[in-house]
Amino acid sequence: MSRSRESPYLAAPTQTPHEAWFRPMGLALRLVTDSPEVLAAAHEAFGGFGECEPQEPADLTLRLFAHDVENDAPAPPLLRVDGPLVYQTMGRGSTLVIDRAHGAGFGYFAPSALAGRASFRWHFLDLALFFFLEERGFLGVHGAALARNGRGLLLRAPSGQGKSTLTYAAARRRFQAVAEDIVWVAPGASALWGMPWTFHLLPDAP
């Protein structure tokens, strides 16, 4: 039976895909996208870890594309987890599905989702990386971390108690910021990782 028109959800990318490689937490992450917005957001999210040479197979692969199916209305993110599969959506036009066991993710995103770059990074790019890391034995600890003179300091407290503000203030006083929200402990406790280039500060932090 033939279809009268192509589904917008199955349409092929309209632009030539770009490929970029990053090394979050020492893993080789391959990104394939047709969207300059996705590419820019990925550099903001993962670029601090440094780029890496292409390798086969990649440890992690994300195939993330733009399309013109707009979300019906602003919607809070909806997360569902079924075994190794993770599904995150913010309306009919923006959906990400990842397979944690195989380190693979695929998604299509509406223009409005890509326009809010900070939200897109947090709800899709960071989310995918966090689930991948847990599958590979990393332990995520809610806290902040600083380093100075070869020693580290882990700051633990409930949300809203000032961990990020204190970490930011210390970074301005020659401490090295390691993480301000989630500290990732590598398998075997061989290293601590974070993403210190993004801070989530409350309005009264200044």
Image (spheres, rainbow, N blue to C red):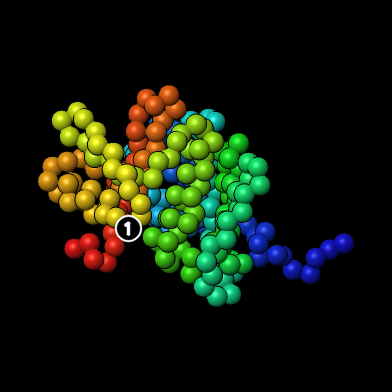
Q: Residue at x 61, y 54 (%)?
A: 80
User: Would you say 182 lies left or right of 86 here?
Assistant: left
Q: Residue at x 20, y 40 (%)?
A: 176
**Taking the image as drawn, is residue 186 in sight?**
yes
User: The N terminus appears in which quarter of the rendering?
Assistant: bottom right
Query: What x and y, as percent, mark residue 196?
Result: 29, 46
User: Would you say 81 lies left or right of 21 here?
Assistant: right
Q: Is residue 199 above or below residue 4?
A: above
Query: What x and y, as percent, mark residue 191?
Result: 35, 29
**Amino acid type of the residue that numbered disc 1 sits on in the rendered structure:** Gly
Instruction: Tell me the quarter of the picture where residue 146 sits.
Output: top left
User: Would you say 7 lies left or right of 166 here?
Assistant: right
Q: Which residue is mark 1?
A: 160
Residue farthest toward the left in the current orientation of the protein: 173
Q: Residue at x 23, y 66 (%)?
A: 204
Q: Is residue 52 above or below residue 168?
A: above
